[in-house]
Image: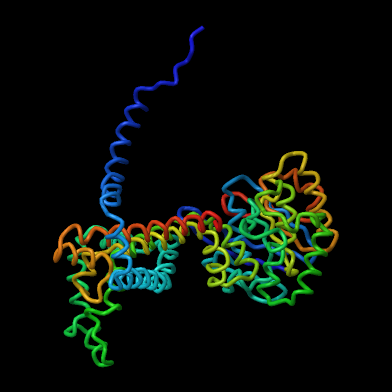
Amino acid sequence: MKIRSSFNYTHTLFILLGGVILLFLIAPLAGMFLSVKAPELFATLEDREVSESIFRTLAISALATGIAAIFALPLSYILARKKFPLKGLLEAIIDLPVMIPHSAAGIALLGFISRDSALGSLASSFGLNLVGSNVAIAMAMAFVSLPFLINSAKDGFAAVPVRLEQAAETLGASKFRIFTQISLPLAKRSVVSGLLLMFARGMSEFGAVVIVAYHPMTTPVLIFDRFNSFGLSYARPVAVIFVAVTLILFILLRIYQKRKC
Amino acid sequence: MLKIDNLVYSIGDFNLGPVSFSMEKGDYLAVFGPSGAGKSLLLELIAGLRFPASGSVCIDSKEYVNIGAQNRPVGMLFQDYALFPHLSVFDNIAYSLRLKKTNRDTIEKRVKELSDYFSIGNLLKREIESLSGGEKQRVALARAIAYDPLILLLDEPLSALDDDLRAEAVDTLASLKRAGQTIIHVTHNRNEVGTLASKNLYMSGGLIK
């Protein structure tokens, strides 16, 4: 009797190739975690500058994501539902922040919010200096991370059958109610994924943030600052703590998302 | 009751109309014809989901041609039933009543009345995904008439059902007709409306023949 072999050369090769990639992703992070000694870690944990920067980074990214969502979700819905001239161009513009160097995005934003600009001078007239402020950090985070929210939500809205929206309309729902009661709940999984991706991308942003606001320091900027001023061993514990905080946060959010969706 | 006058609509290469017909309260109008004849399009124009290039849609002597679906006294049963999958059976049926800010007691009374009428009282807490085709059809019918629309539009209401469920569904539609509900039933299968229809229209190539 011939026994059918489950051994497959192609799949074995794929597993080996995939393993190399996984190793490439895991090894540097594992190495960083293993190279930090406990006393350094505890000392860094007690460092107020570190804890404040982590709180600032998470809070600003969450706030930027929340505020941006108010504007981005309606845009995602329009992109998913409507056909209009130059839609392709608009979609390309939305993807632009993913393509361009983030330092260049920072330079562009700096010009947009500096005191010479219309927005900067308007803020100045209220006694606000946008450059080097939490607002500038939020804008830099939002600028580079918005495509993740817009595209994910757009895919979610596009997957909601138009028939359901039409059914709601025949039952007396306004367009706004259709959006809030039918489309948004049904696209919830993609919208939450988009929010998470935007939040994650925003808080890890360095290039654009460092140009518009070196101070107050977000954690990625603090890691760079410590590396630049004092070297690897001083920067590493901060990086370990930040990565650990973000990992814990994302595991909790994923669990929440799995339960809710 | 309903007067359609010279309704004209175009989408891509397809032209519908001019279409004219009328029906009285309590009529059961069957619109049949081959696939692609424009039957569903006609229903969407009556429902207000599409707007015609010209013509008139008069319901109870009031012109609705420029009024959207939200404000037309028309209920619609879609071919795939279009039930809201994130809402329970109860919430689906109560959807239009909640939009009209009906008080909770009245909503519960109306849903109970409809669920008794369609024999779906035991399904009210169920998720839509867990329902059979026949159950979905009855829930969709209950939802479509919950707010007492003047006209009920049925878009191929029996096509998604197995043969053994069709007879049961025809009985449900017959009981709606007996209750005096004005109905337009669109189908590609003339036989399925044989015992139901009080009037018939044949459509082909976007025209009533």
Residue B96 visible to the viewer: yes
The reply, left or right, for residue A114 in relation to residue B24 is left
Q: Quadrant of the N terminus of chain B?
A: bottom right
Q: How is the image coloured?
A: rainbow
Instruction: Return the residue nearer the eye: A36 or A26.
Output: A36
x 53%, y 72%: residue: A176
Q: Write down the quadrant of residue A112 in the picture.
A: bottom left
| Position above or below: B192 against A70 | above
Q: From this view, report whether residue A119 is shown above or below residue B111.
A: below
Most extreme residue toward the top is A1
**Residue B32 position within the rendered picture, expressed as x and y whole percent measured from the top left:** 68, 49
Give whichever of A178, A240 is nearer the camera: A240
Examine the image and state in which quarter residue A130 appears.
Answer: bottom left
Q: Is residue A207 left or right of residue B145?
A: left
Residue B149, x across and y down, in percent: 73, 68
Residue A66 x %, y %: 42, 71
- Between A134 and B205, the one lying in front of the other is A134
Q: Position of residue A180 (x, y in %)?
A: 54, 69
Residue at image location 75% in from the left, 54% down from the top = B138
Q: Which sits in the foreground, B95 or B178?
A: B95
Q: Is residue B86 above or below residue A59?
A: above
* Residue A154 visible (yes or no): no
